Amino acid sequence: MDKDLFENLKKVHRFLAGQSFYPIILSTGLALTTYFGRIWQSDSWLIYRNLVWNLFLAWLPYIFSLLTAYLYLRAPRRWWRLAIPATLWLIFFPNAPYLITDFLHLTTRPYVPLWYDILMLSIFSWTGIFLAIASLRTMHRLIERYAGVVLGWLFVVAVISLGGLGIYLGRFERWNSWDLLIRPRFIVENVMARFAEPLDNLRFFGFTLLFTAFLFVCYLMFHSASNPDGLGQEG
């Protein structure tokens, strides 16, 4: 193996490891394994087939975050090159944590024990959360490098709030991420109608706030776990 090729592979490995790629791949593989295991038990692929599609959509913001990080490493000063992948990341970001709402489909079904479906849905949900948090961490780091710590955390809060809103719009209003690209006016009108009559839309505000809080706590846990500093100094 050429030395240059080996060095390039090492760089790719370090880049992917820094983006939590390997545990995400393992989690994705485990999720798909449980789904195919369910097909084997029930002899049907129709039930919960939406999980696979939603998992694919959950990968999109992560992929866009990888592309953004790659472009940054290639040319840090050309920040405008990051605009398109960063915008696509933001648009598709709610798809990752959206997987947790698939618990709404949980019910006792023939041939497959309920505990198995609970475990399968938990793995899919965790994978979606992991994809969301890992991609947000990447974008958070980029914002910090361009704009500082304070704006970096304000960015996190804003994105997570939009994520909570996006999950509501996807689950209850049945909007898709690509609708922001092809029908943005209708989505804005939908949201503004909720704000115009807040007392008649308590579910909208309650759901959005609770999911925003949930995602923020998840991100704080992930962020603190990836930056441990609890052993003190040797002395």
Image: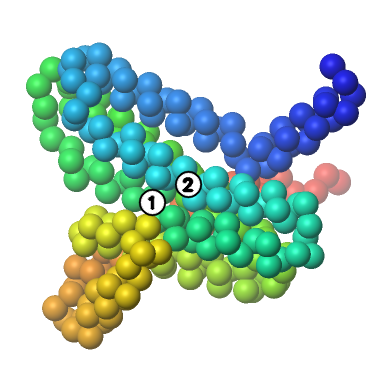
Q: Where is residue 61 shown, x and y percent of the image?
A: 49, 50
Q: Which of 178 and 169 is in front in this view?
A: 178
Q: How is the image coloured?
A: rainbow
What secondary structure is found at the residue carrying circle 1? Answer: helix
Q: Residues within 10 Å of mark 1 (few under 14, many from 20)?
A: many
Q: Vertical placement of 108 versus 148: above or below?
A: above
Farthest residue to the right: give it. 3
Q: Relative to residue 110, is residue 145 drawn left or right?
A: right
Residue shown at 67% from the left, 52% from the top: 69
Mark identifier at residue 95: 1
* Position of residue 60 in the picture relative to residue 33 (left or right): right
Q: Where is residue 133 in the image (x, y as percent from the top left)?
A: 51, 50
Kind of residue indicated by mark 1: Asn
Relative to 148, is 102 above or below? above
Q: Do the residues labelled 1 and 2 touch (CB within 8 Å)?
A: yes
Question: In the image, is residue 134 above or below residue 14?
Answer: below
Instruction: Of the two numbered discs 1 and 2 on the same chain, state the one appearing first in sequence.
Output: 2
Residue located beneath label 2 in the image: 60
- Where residue 7 sits in the image (x, y, percent)? 84, 30
Quarter holding the N terminus? Answer: top right
Q: How crowded is mark 2: few (under 14 residues within 10 Å), some or many (20 or more)?
A: many
Residue at the image position 52 percent from the left and 35 percent from the top: 24
Quarter of the image for residue 185 reads bottom left
> x%, y% of residue 64?
55, 50
Q: Is residue 39 visible?
A: yes
Of the pair 80 and 120, the residue shown nearer to us: 80
Could you tell me which residue is drawn at 25 percent across and 20 percent down? Answer: 38
